Amino acid sequence: MRHEAPENLNTGPASALAGTGVSVLIQLRYQPFRAAHFLPSSCRFDAGGGKWQRDTVFHRVGNFRLQNQSGQLVTAKNLEGSVYVSSFFSATCTKECLKLNSQLQRVQEKFRKEPRLKLISFSVDPQHDSVPVLAGYAEQYGAIAGKWYFLTGAADSVQRLAVQDYKIAQTESATIGSAVGLVHSQRLVLVDRDKQIRGIYDGLDPKDVDRLMTEIRILLYTYDHD
């Protein structure tokens, strides 16, 4: 059976393979994700080839225990087997966060019928963003229950996630504001089913969000054809 590849993928190295008889799956795997610049690489010695090989080592995010907009406890276990897009916002952010979440609405709509794709929005202002506030915020953006989580919790836990796990404060350009000393960002972070960061995108740029959605489809496609 021949599998059809997602559309609009004829860019970059994969397009160079077109017409060569290389399978669609190999073309997709050859198309690299634009992994974040902070992702390290490791070296290993190839005994057969007698050469050192360089492998990409994706940064793995840690666990968390936070409340969602329904008051339910959510941990990384709730996301097992899922690909998700994470973001950091505050309900009192009146400009950039509104644009950011409007772009996330596009992502939710694009993958409305795809249960493996979830959205995780971490509040950086827990003093203000209570469960009832997040419930109203989720309703405002039409968040689908079980698909788009708005999470709140201890400020130090959220700050650790933002800085150490999701790396959104790596560059000054990522910062669009702060609330109670915490950073919120225009960056969207794509995390795969193994809790590894696969890319970081500008959530205020519709074209970059289009790229995010394309790379989500590629990732899901490779899982379907492993």
Image (tube, rainbow, N blue to C red):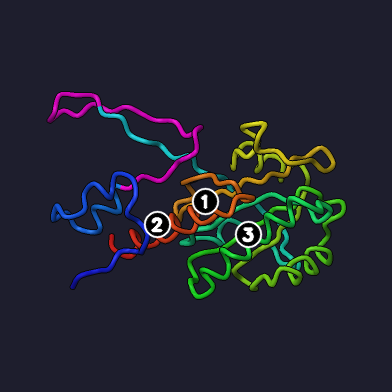
Mark 1 → mark 2, Cα distance in angstroms: 10 Å
The residue tagged 2 is 219
Which residue is rendered at x = 23% and y = 53% of the image? 26
- Residue type indicated by callout 1: Leu
Q: How far across and how far down the image is residue 157, in percent?
A: 71, 44
Q: How far across and how far down the image is residue 48, in percent?
A: 12, 30
The residue tagged 1 is 190
Would you place residue 25 above or below residue 38 in this image? Answer: below
- Residue type indicated by callout 3: Gln
Give the side of residue 136 with respect to residue 212, left or right. right
Q: Which residues are magenta?
A: 31-52
Q: Closest to the observer: 81 or 134?
A: 134
Helix, strand or loop status at disc 3: helix
Of callouts 1 and 2, which one flags the residue occurring earlier in the amino acid sequence? Answer: 1
Mark 3 → mark 1, Cα distance in angstroms: 14 Å
Looking at the rendering, which quadrant does residue 13 occupy? top left
Q: Residue furthest bottom?
A: 113
Helix, strand or loop status at disc 2: helix
Disc 2 to disc 3: CB gap under 8 Å: no
Disc 1 to disc 2: CB gap under 8 Å: yes
Is residue 32 one of those drawn in magenta?
yes
Of callouts 3 and 1, which one flags the residue occurring earlier in the amino acid sequence? Answer: 3
Looking at the rendering, which quadrant does residue 142 occupy? bottom right
Which residue is rendered at x = 28% and y = 28% of the image? 44
Mark 2 → mark 3, Cα distance in angstroms: 20 Å
Is residue 13 one of those drawn in magenta?
no
Would you place residue 23 above or below residue 199 in this image? Answer: below
